[in-house]
Image (cartoon, grey):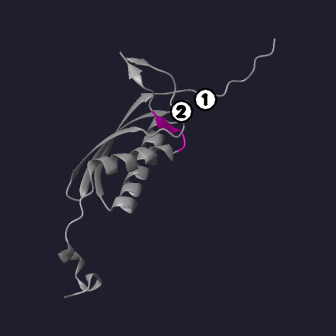
Amino acid sequence: MTAMSDTDPGERGRLHIAERVVERVAGYAVTLVPDATAAPRRVLGRSMGQRDEEDEAKVSAEVHGGTASVHATIAVRWPASVRAVAQEVRTRIRDDLTHITQVTVDHVDIDVVSLPAETTRTRRVR
């Protein structure tokens, strides 16, 4: 009988990364990008309040073998560049998924559905 450490890793079996795992990693990656946040919840086309800073973005993923396609719905804080934030989100999702799950990301689609202003308000003096 051979010890587990002596067995070739390819002979031990397969590792399957579930789509839900990829979605959670990608959703959390969005929270790490400055000026990107989870999109507010919508009911009948209307935004229902703000999301917390720590809320994960809504993400769906399809994983085929070791390759994933990711779709994220996010908000970008006003007045940040939507294009720059979206590119940073794509890069962060790719890097985190590759590092944490060893899944290759073939593309990341991003929907920006909201441009919330800063939540801190300055006090008006009369």
In the structure shown, which secondary structural element does the residue marked by tag 2 occupy? Answer: loop
Question: Circles 2 and 1: CB distance less than 8 Å?
Answer: yes
What is the residue that sits farthest to the top in this orientation?
A: 126
Q: Using residue 43 as the reference point, say whether residue 69 is left or right of it.
A: left
Is residue 86 or residue 71 the one in the foreground? 71
Q: From what the image shows, is residue 4 above or below residue 48?
A: below
In the image, the segment drawn in magenta is 34-38
Residue 18, given in percent of the width and then of the height, sits at: 27, 52
Q: Main secondary structure of the magenta part?
A: strand
Structural distance between the alpha carbons of marks 2 and 1: 7 Å
Q: In the rendered image, which residue does mark 2 sit on?
A: 77
Within 10 Å of disc 1 (Cα), the crowding (few <14, some 14-19, many 20+) is: few
Q: Is residue 37 magenta?
A: yes
Q: Is residue 88 left or right of residue 22?
A: right
Which residue type carries mark 2?
A: Arg
Q: Which mark is residue 36?
A: none
* Amino acid type, mark 1: Glu
